[in-house]
Image: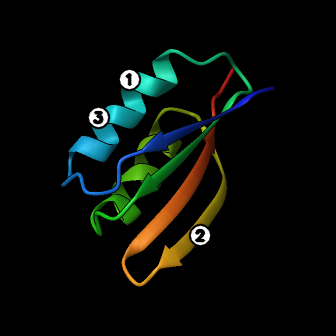
């Protein structure tokens, strides 16, 4: 299992979600994608997207006043 970082800070929704989808397509089953973001809407859309696609959220942390990090493990 490998861990990859995706920096989407500064991007407005839905771009963090779109970037996450493209990045996840490149990963192997069991790999983790750590997504840094500051779009408030993504606090709901990223976990929902992960669940709808069978992926597992392994971490979800607030990293600042208006920034977060979510780690999603690719299904497989």
Residue 14, x across and y down, in percent? 21, 46
Residue lying at the far right in this picture: please name it.
1
Image side of residue 40 versus residue 12, left or right: right
Q: Earlier in the sequence, mark 2 or mark 3?
A: 3
In-front residue for pair 44/66: 66
The residue identified by callout 2 is: 61
Kindly identify the residue that appears in the image at 23 percent across and 42 percent down. Answer: 15
Is residue 46 shown above or below 29? below
Quadrant housing the C terminus: top right
Image side of residue 30 versus residue 71, left or right: right
In-front residue for pair 24/38: 38
In-front residue for pair 47/32: 32
Q: Are marks 3 and 1 in contact (CB under 8 Å)?
A: yes
Q: Tell me if mark 3 has few (under 14), some (14-19) or many (20+) residues whose alpha carbon lies within 10 angstroms of its own.
A: few
Residue 38, x across and y down, in percent? 34, 65
Q: Tell me if mark 2 has few (under 14), some (14-19) or many (20+) residues whose alpha carbon lies within 10 angstroms of its own.
A: few
The residue identified by callout 3 is: 18
Mark carried by residue 22: 1
Kindly identify the residue that appears in the image at 47 percent across and 79 percent down. Answer: 64
Residue 74, x across and y down, in percent? 63, 29
Residue 35, x across and y down, in percent? 50, 48
Q: Earlier in the sequence, mark 1 or mark 2?
A: 1
Kindly identify the residue that appears in the image at 39 percent across and 64 percent down. Answer: 43
Image side of residue 13 versus residue 53, left or right: left
Image side of residue 14 versus residue 31, left or right: left
Q: Do the residues labelled 1 and 2 touch (CB within 8 Å)?
A: no
In space, the residues marked 3 and 1 are separated at their CA atoms by 6 Å
In space, the residues marked 2 and 3 are separated at their CA atoms by 20 Å
Quadrant housing the N terminus: top right
């Amino acid at each position: 299992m490998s861990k990859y970082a995706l920096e989407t800070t500064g991007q407005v929704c839905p771009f963090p979600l779109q970037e996450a989808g493209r990045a996840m397509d490149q990963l192997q089953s069991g790999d983790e994608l750590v997504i840094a973001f500051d779009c408030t809407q993504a606090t709901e859309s990223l976990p929902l997207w992960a669940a709808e696609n069978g992926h597992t959220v392994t971490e979800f942390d607030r990293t600042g006043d208006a920034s977060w990090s979510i780690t999603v493990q690719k299904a497989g």
